[in-house]
Amino acid sequence: MIMRGDVAVIGVGMTKFDEHWNKQLRDLFVEAALEALDDARVSLKDVKAMFVGNMGSGMWVEQEHLGSLLADYLGISGVPSLKVESACASSGMAFRLGLMSVTAGLHDVVLVGGVEKMSDVTTSESTHHLATAADREWEAFYGMTFPGLFALIARRHMKQYGTTREQLAKVAVKNHKHGSYNPKAQYQRAISIEDVLNSPLVADPLRLLDSSPISDGAAAVIIARSDIARRFTDTPVYVLGSGAATDAIALHDRDDITTLRSVVLAAKEAYNMAKVEPEDVNLAEVHDCFTIAEILAYEDLGFARKGEGGKLIDEGVTELGGKIPVNPSGGLKAKGHPVGATGVAQVVEVTLQLRNEAGKRQVSNAEIGLTHNIGGSGASCIVHILGRGRR
Amino acid sequence: MSDMSVPKTPRIWQLAERRYRLIGSKCLKCGRVFVGSRKVCPQCGSRELEDVELSRKGKIYSYTVIRASPMEREKYGPYIMAIVELDDGCKLTTEIVDCSPEEIDIGTEVEATFRKIGEESKSGVIYYACKFRPVAKGV
Ligand SMILES: [Zn+2]
């Protein structure tokens, strides 16, 4: 397939994920974008197009038309610039569109970013806004929320496969431990299994510490045609595979809610394009919006057989130092989850890991990394496979 | 926040009858039944679907108790939400009422009951739909 290895990530940047009460959405985006440009040693005039992942700026900060706004504030007004929306998978999808624009020969250097500003409203307003990624008329209208949807998945998974409450808690414990090594994580403190099990219930059986937080933040990467990447950087990271897929928007319209079909489909496309098997992956940044989502990711990405995701966390396989570290950044749980920024932030982390620049959370000998970004309750999924070599 | 993000009256009426009478769509080719209105069957691609009254009885497929409420239910307190698998095979998302979470489980038999869902504002339109409650045990 034409995309394999043809595009390189040549620069990365991100803000700290946090509640940034004194910063605006545009400030956050520009901060991340400038960091990525400087990292790539790319000047503003080299950027030929921009794609920005964002889920709901119209709801959260009453601002749309982000493509133009952010190009203007970044000082590159004039280039084509587009907002991309696929709920929490918005910037994973923006990254894919960026790749497509490069492989199509339209642009040789492209900026892909993601941004979300969520903390300007109350938690219950954010809960409402997030639920617009579900089926408004047949789920949210009746009072369903995002934690609620993942709670339904968790209860079914526990019933069908015997996944335990403690196994879910261990996902949060692991990701908080990883987050404690990441200076850009929203939470940089370790927690215990007891902390998770004693935290308030959000949607039974899921608790507060099973859930990713409400966050503000932005992430950005510069991508370029692989054959010109070394003009800018000595450490290009190559995009080996890209897969995207959808599923029924409403959880109740899916046959089996313990598998996210969109993930299975997107992973298959990405693995095939990259000519990589799940066993070849050295690290993964997965979409742990709730702890159960990471367990599903293990299974649907092929790291574990269906129903055996809980065993993987028990055996420590996915911890730093394990066979396949998952979410060395701290994941959505500890790093934070400004929804529209998450997909690109995953690419930032995998790139740093493959460049051997991840500091205390560095995965040793990382050659191949995977990102897994889902929208809503899995009605969209984007998977990318990146490599240190072009292969 | 204004009432901007609360459903507007016309949208409520578009689906009122489907919600009041629990009308869904049935694929005439593969037989699958869906909540809501569909013109194409997502399972087999057929364009031959008809409106049907959904079964009013079913079993709980999965459930949860929502304790962090969205803004339109901030003052409502915790409530049970579930996916119910109806006797006709259709699955839907609904609130479970008239019981405590301890009284239900996956597999509990439930039946439809007509209830208020919410209101647009203090003086605005009130909207209704079906919720589900456990089927009374014994005779
Ligand atoms: Zn059909």
Image: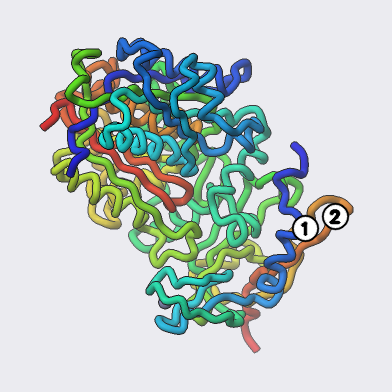
| Label 2 environment density (alpha carbons within 10 Å; few <14, some 14–19, many ≥20) | few
**Residue A28 placement, left or right of A299:** right
| Position of B128 relative to A293 (above/below) | below
| Position of B21 relative to A279 (above/below) | below
The residue lying furthest to the bottom in this view is: B139
Please report, as a chain letter, where disc 2 is located: B
Residue A323 visible in the displayed image: no
Secondary structure type for disc 2: loop
**Residue A381 placement, left or right of A22:** left
Residue, disc 1: B9
Please report, as a chain letter, where disc 1 is located: B
Chain-order first, disc 2 or disc 1: 1
The kind of residue tagged 1 is: Thr
Residue at left offset 35%, top offset 23% = A221
x and y percent of residue A310 in the render? 31, 49
Residue, disc 2: B124
